[in-house]
Amino acid sequence: MDHLWIEGARVPLEVHAPRLLLPPVDADRGAGGPYTLGAAIARALVPAALRHRPDLVIAHDIELRTVAPDLRDAIPAARRTVADELPPAERILVHASGRTRRIANGLAEFVRDYATYLRDTRIPHDEAIRDHASSARPAARPSPPRPPAENEAVGAAGPWTIVVRNVHEADFTDRELIEVLLRRLDPALVTVIVCAPTARELLEPLATALTTRARRLPGAADGDGPAASRTGSAGHRWQGGPALPYPGDRRLDELTGEELREAVERCFEAGCHHAVAELGRRALAACEPGAEGWWRLVHRTATALASTEREEQARELLDQVRRVSLDPAEHAAAAYSTGMLLMRHHDPARRDPQEALAWVNQAIAISTLLPDPALRAFKLGFDLNGRALIEMRLGRVEDALALVERAIALADEGLAPGRHPIHRLVLRANRAQLKIMLGRFDEALGDLDAAIAADPCYPDYYIDRGNLLYRMGRAADARADYETAMRVGPPFPEPYYNRAEIRFAEGDHEGALADLGHALELDPGFADAYINRAGLLVALGEHERARADAERGLQLAPANPYLLCVLGQIEMAGGGDAAERAERARHAFDHALRRDPLLASAWANRGILAFETGDVDGAVRDLTRALELTGTDESGDTAPLLFNRAVALRAAGREREAVADLTRALELAPDDEDVRRALAVG
């Protein structure tokens, strides 16, 4: 059983798609915009799921309410953040580019779990398809009558089917969702049929998913198969995701004026940055520069362009603001945004903190002069926080902390109680990170406690607090925070990745592997998870699996020193000619140290390799450097390093130094029998 890739815009008549889970969807973004497929899934499944499995709807309320805003009255909002209750001017957090992947994973889990329920309970689903066919299908013409097999009860043999047409015209959000569905849905449960002429027209990772997860079939010849019209006519109703959530007589690409600007706003609120960039530029082309609403469109569009790695195009829009606008607040915001482009450029080589500092200082200077006290307190605090980021990146952490403290004081003194709560909690959370860098853990914990208390359904702060708690030796509390992060938002890999470290430390290697595997299921591009899983597999002696992870990780992060170090360990432990293995391992460790001369594990492993190949003096040098980099006698790595250096020192005839290392190692690890035996020999 396979997913299917139809190399055409639609399914040929000879390809039978029985037992549709929802009516075929035309994913053309010009018709319905982002999440056209996601919204169709929600509209087809939610009404029946609310009757039979309301717990599934509640568990995925954020995802479903995001893709289909018209269902918000029907879907209980179990997880609400502070932003949900605020006016637009105070919802200052911009969704990260990875948010759409979280939404896609949540939708895939909803489809998987509901389809599993249908299969296991034999509840008929054809009624839901009939009731919601018209609103779920954005195609201009209804599909021809479905064959009888589509209306069979769920208990009949065979999988459910999702058919998606015109995927090459789909928005990024739907292409990403299809990629996740292809990876995460068992085709024996739900078969996804994707209609797209060629993978070359699709963005990664969907192109790879089609070629690796779907069986390829030729598409319909011209005139064959059901097609979707690209132009509206009387009686046709168009509907999509956040951009076009309500049925109308025009496609999204036919909207103009205020309707188009409203679509931009809805997409921005949903985190659909590719759509904002496309629709925003269309709206700007029809808007007189400097006219009412122009700056808001520029800001939305520039933010979306930056979020989709098109910083130069964003900079062009901000430069236009400087040429057109006479509004000081707009100039301050444009200067701040320019500074952030320079600090956060997706290409590290293009980042320029010194130029960024100049732009943010300009924003601060302008904001200081704003006449309205409340606006000045907010804007100036916002800009000071931006400068704090730059100071932190320049290594001036104390200066950064002073700036954040000043921003907090401005909010406390200049804003009315209850105003701008997100701004306040962001400042507290940022102050916590700076205090962590300064070793002031207890104070940082108080700030993170306050941020979480202010917005208990924002998952990322649980990750920050969990990381701090783990550093403070409170592993159980850290684990509780990671598991809360798993529940309060759509699925994302970081809490599983972090819990894996705790499980590994507790000796639960299978649990750690399961968490790392799930993190990679949620995001196959999460290079750090490959690093940790490869290292864990090396420790468990599963060298071929470790090599596969290391090589996959290096495809994502070429020359990553941690992965190179793992490759060196694999070569040391592998079979074959010992001299050739040693040479390959040494090359990997040397390469890792060229990339990161402060990587203690590479020094340590190269030292062990040197000892094993007879270079005793080289072993002592490398192990000494590893100990210098470990930095603290409390580190769990220190005792093994001391033991290994003692062995090398003894082999070099430096017995007194060897005994000193063994004595210190025994103080750090009094239950280590290897250390005791080595001391007894001495």
Image (cartoon, grey):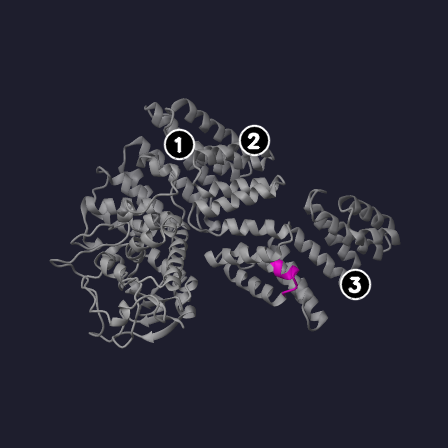
Q: Is residue 539 magenta?
A: yes
> Residue 443, labelled with which disc?
2
- The single residue placed furthest to the left in the displayed view is 234
- Mark 3 element type: loop
- Measured in 3D between alpha carbons, the distance from the residue under mark 2 to the one under mark 3, in whole angstroms, is 50 Å
Q: Nearer the viewer, mark 3 or mark 1?
A: 1
Say which residue label 3 marks.
Answer: 614
Looking at the rendered structure, the kind of residue marked 1 is Pro
Q: Secondary structure at mark 2?
A: helix
| Tag 2 and tag 3, C-beta contact below 8 Å | no
Q: Amino acid at mark 3?
A: Gly
The residue positioned 40% from the left and 69% from the top of the image is: 188
Image-based side of 526 in relation to 32, left or right: right
Task: Please tell me the numbered disc located at residue 421.
Answer: 1
Of the two numbered discs 3 and 1 on the same chain, state the one appearing first in sequence: 1
Name the residue type under label 2: Glu
Horizontal side, residue 576 vs residue 316: left or right: right
Residue 485 x, y percent position in the rendering? 48, 45
Q: Is residue 619 left or right of residue 67?
A: right
Judge whether 13 appears above or below 463 on screen. below
Which quadrant is home to the N terminus? bottom left
Residue name at image x 25 percent, y 71 percent: 148
Check the image and report above or below for 401 versus 474. above
Q: Which residues are magenta?
A: 535-542
**Disc 2 or disc 3, which is closer to the eye?**
2
Asked whether the viewer can see residue 260, the reply is yes
* Residue 48 on image: x %, y %: 30, 55
Provide the secondary structure element on which disc 1 rests: helix
For image coordinates 29% across by 47% down, the residue present is: 74
What is the quadrant of residue 516 in the picture? bottom right
